[in-house]
Image (cartoon, grey):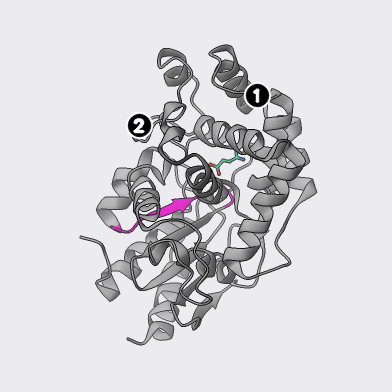
Amino acid sequence: MNYQLILDEIAHEVSCLSNKGKVADYIPALANVDPEQFGMSLTLFDGTQYSVGDSNTLFSIQSISKVFTFTLALKFYSTNLYKRIGREPSGDPFNSLVQLEYEHGIPRNPFINAGAINVTDALISYFGNSTKASEEIFQFIRDISDETSVNCSKIVATSEMDHGFRNMALANLMKSFNNLDNDVYDIIQTYFRHCAIEMNTKMLSRAMLYLANHGVDPINGMVHITEQQAKRINAVMLTCGHYDASGDFAFHVGLPGKSGVGGGIAVVVPQKMGICVWSPGLNAQGNSLLGTIALELFATKTGMSIF
Ligand code: GLU
């Protein structure tokens, strides 16, 4: 298959669309990102990469980081993790408080904000303190992307901290139900630090490979998680990876993936490749508008879908 041609076609087709979506301005540091940008990359199991557009531009990975923290928590806690977090789609916006209240502080899944904050808390407990937890999260992401330069934007992390009232509320609510172990401020700061990690589509498409290959990095052979854990993470990405548009994404694209409000979407094609697309303008559900369309075009043109 001529992947470069397919990516070039997709980039051309989305560039003709007049509506590019709206950047996430509830995080002030992200409000000024140019919505015209578009980049897409795919990485095959032998390391070959194909890219188009702004594939070297670093962007805020935001909720895509939740896939990586969930991976670590599942690795260390195994199924005990599900005593504190569910694995059902929420059907509610990613930062909703209502469901958390009537479900007694147990978040529906690890990909809504409450769930990811809870996962961060579990990792702080596992590693003993928030500094060590942050270091381990960053190191894991450097390992899977094979990119030692991966780091977070202090500007974005601080901006989130200054405006993260709703995430603070989610954390305090869980704490009131005894479903968080550590200091709320510490947890939220660690959570924002991993959301503020910056990567490009090349790095992220590479980072998804272990999930496309049963938990093992197909390039260097590193075993990150078990085959069963990789299967579970892919299942949760498919059912919960795109906020309350997860059903729609499964319907139109049919591949496990995770989006973030920075405009990135990282996707797994089982046994074949990792993909990442980025365009900062979002649709009404908070997913990259052009990114979602690009992935639908990719699935249609290549016939790649798990269904
Ligand atoms: N850091 C963002 C928040 O907590 C993540 C949101 C997202 O990408 O879904 O609001």
Q: Nearer the viewer, residue 229 or 254?
A: 229
- Which part of the image, by quadrant, shows the N terminus? bottom left
15 relative position to 129: left or right = left
- Which secondary structure is most common in the magenta stretch? loop
Could you tell me if the residues under marks 2 and 1 are in contact, i.e. CB atoms within 8 Å? no
Q: For ligand 1, which image quadrant applies?
A: top right
Residue 34 visible in the displayed image:
no
Secondary structure state at the residue bearing disc 1: helix
Q: How many marks?
A: 2
Q: Is residue 260 magenta?
A: yes
Circle 1: residue type: Met
Q: Position of residue 224 (x, y in %)?
A: 51, 60
* Rendered position, 74 above or below 174: below
Q: Nearer the viewer, residue 164 or 204?
A: 204
Q: Nearer the viewer, residue 58 or 286?
A: 58
* Rendered position, 41 above or below 165: below
Q: Which residues are magenta?
A: 253-262
Q: Position of residue 52 (x, y in %)?
A: 52, 77
Q: CA distance from mark 2 to mark 1?
A: 21 Å
Q: Position of residue 180 (x, y in %)?
A: 59, 23
- Which residue is identified by label 1? 168
* Rendered position, 236 above or below 177: below
- Which residue is identified by label 2? 91
Circle 2: residue type: Gly
- Mark 1 beta carbon near ligand 1 (under 8 Å): no
Secondary structure state at the residue bearing disc 2: loop
